[in-house]
Amino acid sequence: MEDLSFIVGVIGNVISVLVFLSPVGTFWRIVKNGSTEDFESLPYVCTLLSSSLWTYYGITKPGAYLVATVNGFGILAEAVYVVLFLIYAPRKMRVKTGILVGILNVGFLAAAILVTHLALEGDTRIDAIGFMCAGLNIIMYGSPLAAMVPNGIGFLLGTAQLILYAIFRKARPSNDTISQGLLEQGFQK
């Protein structure tokens, strides 16, 4: 079973390396054009943070060297992307990116390492780091869905409206004297 786990882990690492290399075309274009154009740095800064936390997790958890090595590669790739972004971005975007790197990749990462290393031990430390990593992954990969949720809710409400219209479009007004009396009393006050 351990052999199968290792083989699946290696396959996962190969796929992860390909994912880390997927922005190469974008950055080739940035270097060639000498401009970041309308690209944002946030995805690369967040992926750098994620790779850093996962590497810390892989180093902390016994036997998780596949996690540590592939995310170590991720740190290298994302750091190159962030540096290229800083070189080719306009001044305002460079400042914004520098602040993000300082807050997330230095401040948050250092705080996470210090707190988990100094305040927690053993499996509790490993679990805490794992939860941070998993939470960050959910935020990173789930955030594009946030644009879809309002549209999804609007779709459901619109569908409900159309169904109600289809059901009641030929309905006749009620001759209910009780509700008519209540309506008249409400208008008299």
Image (cartoon, rainbow, N blue to C red):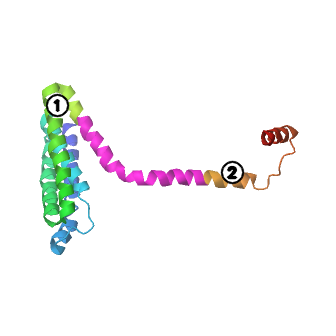
Looking at the image, can residue 62 be seen?
A: no
Q: Position of residue 88 (x, y in %)?
A: 16, 67
Looking at the picture, tell me which residue is in the foreground, 178 or 21: 178
Could you tell whether 34 is left or right of 38 in the image?
left
Q: What residue appears at the point 82 percent right and 38 percent down from the top-left corner?
A: 185
Please identify the dominant SS of the magenta region.
helix
Name the element at disc 2: helix
The answer to whether residue 136 is magenta is: yes
Q: Place residue 29 in its image quadrant.
A: bottom left
Q: Residues within 10 Å of mark 2 (few under 14, many from 20)?
A: few
Looking at the picture, tell me which residue is in the foreground, 42 or 103: 103
Which residue has dot 2 on it?
Answer: 164
User: Is 147 located above or below residue 9 in the figure?
Assistant: below
Q: Residues within 10 Å of mark 1 (few under 14, many from 20)?
A: few
How far is disc 2 from disc 1 in space, using C-alphas?
A: 55 Å
Q: Position of residue 163 (x, y in %)?
A: 67, 53
Quadrant occupied by the N terminus: top left
Q: Place residue 26 in its image quadrant.
A: bottom left
- Range shown magenta: 130-158
Q: Earlier in the sequence, mark 2 or mark 1?
A: 1
Amino acid identity at mark 1: Val
Q: What residue appears at the point 27 percent right and 35 percent down from the top-left corner?
A: 131
Could you tell whether 182 is left or right of 105 in the image?
right
Quadrant occupied by the C terminus: top right
Question: Looking at the image, which residue sits at the far front?
Answer: 189
Amino acid identity at mark 2: Leu
Which residue has dot 1 on it?
Answer: 115
Q: Are marks 2 and 1 in contact (CB under 8 Å)?
A: no
Looking at the image, can residue 59 be seen?
A: yes
Could you tell whether 180 is left or right of 162 in the image?
right
